[in-house]
């Protein structure tokens, strides 16, 4: 099979498709014929720095999500030919991921699905919708009466969060740090050019989804009303930890801080997401589609921020 295999820091322009053996099936694991997958910022982090970490199995096939067909269910309850999606749980880090024509994955992160969506649309769903869903509902307890601030909204996750918030009936405020991208968040009730300081510029925000990360988190905490919740999910700001963070002084009284770690998908959550998409006739936000043979170009375009929305690879 063809696959992307890396063992060191690898720029997008250095990515090549290599020949690899189709994985041998083992108990408790499922062999999937990959039909498509989305690209993610965390895979960029893996390529550009995290690959050096001792906990990364090397060489590794990246990719934290995919959709496809069960090729061999091994001893699991799944059936050959069954349509599935898979995501997270160590995929593309502890064991080989989805940048391949076939992938062998543990049954616990493989979810059977029934949907009329084509493979391309389906490939835009797993990680993006799962992370948005977990952030908005498990962490923020989002409801129709909330005013939701989405900081760093011009990314695939941001677009989905806007989509879900609007379906619920929330007031949605979305930000971007690039003026030319304001039209991309026009579905939000209010669009703001974010220059790094929002404190004192917003009123009535009860929930905040921070996709920038530690770079602006202290400021985001000051933007919500007393009793409000901030969920820090993304790391688009390129700062990964908060040095000198003082919870007593930096978290305003009565404000709550949480974060969503998307490593533990469940059947219940995946079923809820798929039902929500179907019941509300939602269409995944796809920015561009590339064939697998052009994955180098797709990754280059992602790294250069040339695509607005989810990048999908068709296999």
Image (spheres, rainbow, N blue to C red):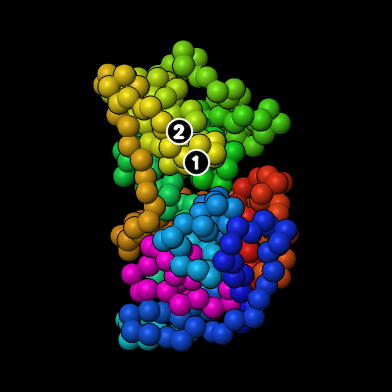
Crowding near the residue tagged with mark 2, few <14, some 14–19, many ≥20 C-alpha atoms within 10 Å? many
Residue sitting at x 66%, y 30%: 178
The residue carrying mark 2 is 214
Please provide percent x and percent y for residue 118: 58, 67
Q: Quadrant of the N terminus?
A: bottom right
Callout 2: helix, strand or loop? Answer: loop
Disc 1 from disc 2: Cα separation: 7 Å
Crowding near the residue tagged with mark 1, few <14, some 14–19, many ≥20 C-alpha atoms within 10 Å? some
The foreground one among 266 and 215 is 215
Per the rendering, the mark at residue 187 is none
Is 278 placed above or below 22 here?
above
Is 22 placed above or below 245 here?
below
Residue sitting at x 49%, y 83%: 23
Please provide percent x and percent y for residue 293: 71, 70
The foreground one among 16 and 224 is 16
Give the mark nearest the N terminus, 1 or 2.
2
Please provide percent x and percent y for residue 304: 70, 46
The residue carrying mark 1 is 235
Residue 120 on the magenta span:
no
Please provide percent x and percent y for residue 297: 73, 59
Indicate left or right for 9 with 248 as reference: right
Residue 103 on the magenta span:
yes
Does residue 125 appear anywhere in the picture?
Answer: no
Question: Mark 1–mark 2 contact, CB under 8 Å?
Answer: yes
The foreground one among 298 and 237 is 237
The image quarter containing residue 62 is bottom right
Does residue 273 appear anywhere in the picture?
Answer: yes
Indicate left or right for 20 with 246 as reference: right
Q: Quadrant of the C terminus?
A: bottom right
Read off the magenta span. 83-109
The foreground one among 303 and 125 is 303
Residue sitting at x 59%, y 31%: 176
């Amino acid at each position: 099979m063809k696959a992307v295999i890396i063992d060191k820091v690898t720029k997008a322009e250095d990515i090549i498709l290599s020949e690899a053996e189709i994985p041998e099936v083992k108990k408790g694991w499922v062999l999937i014929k990959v039909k498509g997958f989305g690209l993610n910022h965390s895979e960029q982090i893996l390529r550009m720095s995290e690959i050096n970490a001792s906990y990364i199995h090397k060489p590794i096939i990246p990719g934290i999500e995919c959709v496809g067909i069960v090729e061999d269910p091994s001893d699991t309850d799944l059936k050959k030919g069954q349509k599935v999606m898979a995501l997270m749980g160590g995929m593309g880090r502890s064991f080989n991921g989805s940048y391949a024509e076939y992938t062998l994955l543990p049954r616990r992160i493989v979810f059977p699905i029934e949907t009329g969506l084509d493979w391309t649309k389906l490939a835009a769903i797993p990680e993006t919708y799962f992370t948005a869903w977990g952030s908005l509902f498990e962490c923020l307890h989002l409801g129709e009466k909330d005013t939701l601030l989405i900081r760093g909204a011009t990314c695939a996750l941001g677009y989905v969060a806007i989509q879900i918030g609007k379906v619920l009936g929330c007031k949605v405020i979305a930000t971007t740090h690039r003026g030319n991208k304001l039209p991309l968040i026009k579905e939000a009730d209010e669009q703001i050019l974010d220059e790094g300081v929002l404190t004192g510029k917003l009123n009535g925000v009860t929930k905040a989804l921070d996709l920038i990360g530690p770079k602006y988190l202290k400021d985001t905490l000051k933007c919500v009303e007393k009793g409000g919740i901030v969920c820090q999910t993304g790391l688009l700001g390129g700062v990964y930890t908060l040095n000198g963070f003082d919870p007593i002084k930096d978290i305003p009284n009565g404000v709550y801080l949480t974060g969503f770690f998307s490593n533990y998908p469940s059947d219940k959550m995946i079923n809820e997401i798929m039902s929500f998409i179907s019941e509300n006739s939602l269409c995944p936000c796809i920015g561009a589609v590339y064939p697998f043979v052009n994955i180098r170009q797709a990754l280059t375009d992602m790294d250069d921020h040339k695509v607005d929305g989810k990048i999908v690879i068709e296999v």
